[in-house]
Amino acid sequence: MDGVGGLTQPHIKPGKTFVYEFETKRSGTFMYHPHSDEMVQMAMGMMGMFIVHPRDLAFRPVDRDFVFIMSAYDMDPGTYLPKVTEMTNFNMWAWNSRVFPGIDPLPVRLGDRVRVRIGNLTMTNHPIHLHGHSFSVSCTDGGWVPESAQWPETTIDVPVGAVRAFDVIADNPGDWAFHCHKSHHTMNAMGHDLRTLIGVPKQTIAKAVKKLAPDSMAMGSTGMAMGEMEMPLPDNTLPMMTGSGQFGPIEMGGMFTVMKIREGLAQDDYRDPGPYQFPKGTVAYEVDTPAAQPVREEQGAPKSPAKNGGNKAMKGMKM
Ligand SMILES: [Cu+2]
């Protein structure tokens, strides 16, 4: 029983219920979604993962098994409905319809064999990356990859309409970033077509721009991090980067979470173990450098009137 409306079955009209019956003939990682008014139904998130476990429990066993379906939405800040006609410019990149920091961490015991299954029903590919480890693709939605055909990776591309599952031995304790490697996919509610204002003293021009376009958002003069982007948000949106860790803001959003690998987790106790206690000598640290001057002055550019005051111009500006 397949679900292509018109081709293999009648369309399911609003208020109606259909039954699908089928045998699960092989194990693996699969996806399901409508083939009826797809642009609308998938743009609004109607999709899911379907996992078939092997009957033989000794076949490729793992200690931890995670699954994510990737979806993308285009929602203007302040609105409540994804745009169903968008084809390229999505601004919310979600795992299981959630964005970081709303995505749970992946707590894992040191030495666990871990499987992460990822399905892609967005309209672009996602190179998925885990820090601190290498791993191999163990199955796709086409079947299990023979061990002799696997090769080591640190990032695996998940094409549109495809599933990739990778198996990793969690042999490196720590808090390891796990994310899509497209930079704008680890951000929420991106403003598109913004001007680049790196190095621009913008305290004065921001006022002028705001007069012309009160809702405009100017990028910070040193970047897009939260310190530069202090502004009230409209209802029902998210900052582009948010979440915090033991050392400060994480400045990621979207398709991002953390695999927390710990020694000594109790059997079956996979609650969030909190931030990693780094052993001495395993965290990068600051050293004194001689004469650290602002770059713009070293290059002989005019002195900025916005020096140290640039952030204030952002306050009150809306996305
Ligand atoms: Cu991505």
Image: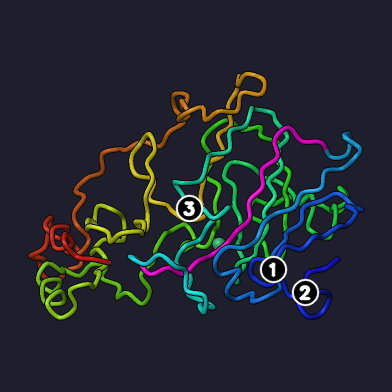
Magenta stretch: dominant secondary structure? strand
The numbered mark, 2 or 1, whose residue comes first in the sequence reads: 2
Q: Which of marks 3 and 2 is in front?
A: 2
- Picture layout, residue 263 above or below residue 241: above
Q: Residue placed at 53% from the left, 65% from the top?
A: 72
Q: Give the left or right position of residue 241, taking residue 65 as reference.
A: left
Q: How crowded is the residue under tag 3: few (<14 C-alpha within 10 Å), some, or many (20+)? A: many
Give x and y (percent) for residue 281: 44, 27
* Residues in magenta, as a range: 61-76
Q: Residue placed at 44% from the left, 46% from the top?
A: 101
The residue under label 1 is which amino acid type? Pro
* Residue 71 is inside the magenta segment: yes
**What number is the disc on residue 34?**
1
The numbered mark, 3 or 1, whose residue comes first in the sequence reads: 1
**What number is the disc on residue 4?**
2
User: Closest to the observer: 45 or 138?
Assistant: 45
